[in-house]
Image (cartoon, rainbow, N blue to C red):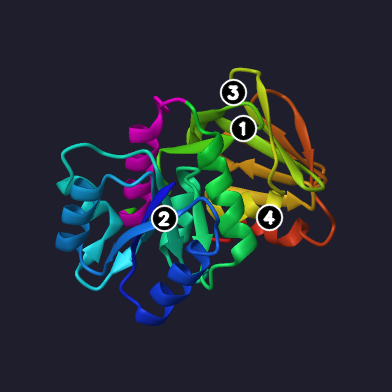
Amino acid sequence: MRVAIIEDEPAVRKEISYLVQQETDVELVGWSDTVTNAVKLIEEKQPDVILMDIQLRDGTAFDILKKLTVIPQNIIFITAYNHFAIKAIKYGALDYLLKPVDQTELNEALERYRRKSENNPQWMQRLSMAQEALHASELPESIALSSIHQVRIVPVHNIVYCKGDGPYTFFFLNDGTKELISKPLKYYEELLPQPYFLRTHQSYLVNRSHISGVNRSEYIVLKNKEEIPISSRRKNSILNQLFPEK
């Protein structure tokens, strides 16, 4: 497997280079720390996998992709946990590694590409979603939900509510279907924030646009007539958001 590294922090690049070279079947074919050089490196070397930092000193990973003749599907993004770009990456359900990069996580990411055998027809759409989310001041229009068997792209307004179940989240959609996603509810609470979505209960995150009212201050009533519980400790906050004092 031929790997290229796009990273402008020398210490981080050195560490990733070392980790990559610990993989027995991996060859490091080059690195770049600028947008222009990254484009040249990718087009000349055509690596099997690209480890690409989201934010370079002269632009972003998306600036690199816009300059390429062919957009590759073999990118593993690299970002810091507190970087604003991580939310954008999650919206597109794109593959990423957090700094500092861990050997085990790198190995698992590369293993996914070792097993990869076909093109992803949604790749360009997911990239566009992430780029939109990177610059969006409001909630992006769509989100990619990655289940065990597929990645489904869902308009955010079609999400009625989410129900957490330990390390999993059920998404209930307005067409009556539901999706089981192997991420906890807290993961999506960060991606679907207030005031658009309300965490009414430890197990529920509700799309405000699907709320029709409140029943006895104990349940959110949805437009489809379902009732979602309101926890006692969240009651005042929820009611104040739904019925602000004038």
Which label belongs to residue 27? Answer: 2
Which residue, as the protein is rendered here, is positioned at the far bottom?
11
Q: Magenta region: which residues?
A: 118-135
Number of residues whose C-alpha sits closer than 10 Å to that of mark 2, classed few (under 14), some (14–19) or many (20 or more): some
State the separation of the CA atoms marked 2 and 3. Answer: 47 Å
Q: What element does badge 1 sit on?
A: strand
- Where residue 2 appears, as percent x and y from the top left, is 39, 49
Q: Position of residue 243 (x, y in %)?
A: 61, 52
Residue drawn at (68%, 55%), measured in percent from left and top? 186
Q: Please tell me which residue lies in front, 241 or 66.
A: 66
State the separation of the CA atoms marked 1 and 3: 6 Å
Alpha carbon separation for disc pair 4 and 2: 38 Å
Amino acid identity at mark 4: Lys
Amino acid type, label 2: Glu
Residue count near mark 3 (Cα–Cα under 10 Å), binned few <14, some 14–19, many ≥20: some
Identify the residue under disc 4.
Answer: 186
Judge by depth and name the residue closer to the eye, 40 or 173.
40
Q: Between tags 1 and 2, which lies in front?
A: 2
Q: Amino acid at mark 1?
A: Val
Residue 160: which disc?
1
Tell me the residue that label 3 is attached to: 174
- Drawn side of residue 114 relative to residue 50, left or right: right
Q: Is residue 55 above or below residue 208?
A: below
Rounded to the nearest angstrom, the CA distance separating label 1 from label 2 is 47 Å
- Relative to 42, is 213 above or below? above
